[in-house]
Every structure is written in structure tokens, then in C-alpha cells.
């Protein structure tokens, strides 16, 4: 293992007092990451409850995928909802039609 000397604490105040909640440790290691870029897709609800909804959409989604959801509930005036949801299941309904179970996270 390639050991490196400890990294001295940083101070933005110039007083030499460390203000971070947790100490930093100097380490070099490879990291895998991906940038999530939002894209807007459209679908139609088949049913909805306090815990989630069934979404009819035209693409396959992996189980566990987190979705940003935005829709209006009927009413006068309509209630606008913005939520996060997780794909819990998906079934093929027809050619390029997927019923997708979404659990609300927010």
C-alpha cells in the first residue's frame, strides 16, 4: 500500500484552528462515479394511492430506479404534486407499453 504523509488541517480563518466536524485523512484511491442528467419522460397513471402509483410508460426501467415525478391531481383547482419515487416492479403491457409500480419516497 502506498502510504502518504498526513494532510495538515486547513484553516480559512488564518488562526490555525480546525473548524471541520470530522478530520480528513490523506488517501489516494480510484473512484467510479456517474453524473445523473435529468431527462423528462411522459406517462399516464393507471391508479394512485398515498403510498405510490402505477405508471404506464413506453420504456423499460430498472428495478430500484429513482424517478422525479410531477403531476396534477384532479380537483378545482387541481393539486400539483412533485415527488420522488422508486421503481418497485414493471410488467410488459403491450408493444412499447410498460405498467410500472412506483413507491413514493417523498
Image (cartoon, rainbow, N blue to C red):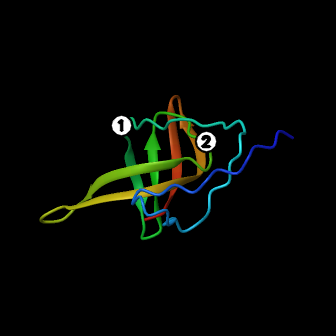
Q: Which of 89/92 is in front?
A: 89
Residue 76 placement, left or right of 26: left
**Callout 2 environment at 10 Å: few (<14), some (14 to 19), or many (20+)?**
few
Residue 60 pos. (x, y %): 56, 36
Q: Quadrant of residue 38?
A: top left
The quarter of the image holding the C terminus is bottom left
In the figure, 37 relative to 89: above or below?
Answer: above
Q: Which of 21/104 is in front?
A: 21
The residue sitting at 47% across, 68% down in the picture is 51
In the figure, 36 relative to 46: above or below?
Answer: above
Q: Secondary structure beneath disc 1? A: loop
For disc 2, the marked residue is 62
- The Cα–Cα distance between marks 2 and 1, rounded to whole angstroms, is 17 Å
**Residue 40 numbered mark, or none:** 1
Residue 67 pos. (x, y %): 46, 48
**Residue 91 numbered mark, or none:** none
Q: Quadrant of residue 50?
A: bottom left
Residue 83 placement, left or right of 95: left
Q: Secondary structure beneath disc 2? A: loop
| Residue located farthest toward the top when viewing the structure as drawn | 95
The residue sitting at 43% across, 64% down in the picture is 15
**Callout 1 environment at 10 Å: few (<14), some (14 to 19), or many (20+)?**
few
The residue sitting at 57% across, 57% down in the picture is 9
Residue 47 placement, left or right of 88: left
Q: Which of 54/38 is in front?
A: 38
Residue 89 pos. (x, y %): 61, 51
Nearer-N-terminus badge (2/1): 1
Amino acid at each position: 500500500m502506498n502510504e502518504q504523509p498526513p494532510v495538515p488541517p486547513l484553516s480559512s480563518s488564518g488562526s490555525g484552528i480546525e473548524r471541520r466536524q470530522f478530520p480528513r485523512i490523506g488517501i489516494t484511491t480510484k473512484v467510479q462515479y456517474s453524473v445523473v442528467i435529468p431527462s423528462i419522460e411522459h406517462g399516464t397513471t393507471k391508479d394512485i394511492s398515498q403510498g405510490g402509483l402505477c405508471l404506464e410508460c413506453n420504456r423499460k426501467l430498472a428495478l430500484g430506479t429513482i424517478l422525479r415525478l410531477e403531476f396534477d391531481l384532479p380537483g378545482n383547482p387541481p393539486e400539483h404534486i412533485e415527488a420522488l419515487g422508486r421503481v418497485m416492479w414493471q410488467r410488459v403491457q403491450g408493444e412499447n407499453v410498460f405498467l410500472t409500480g412506483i413507491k413514493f419516497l417523498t
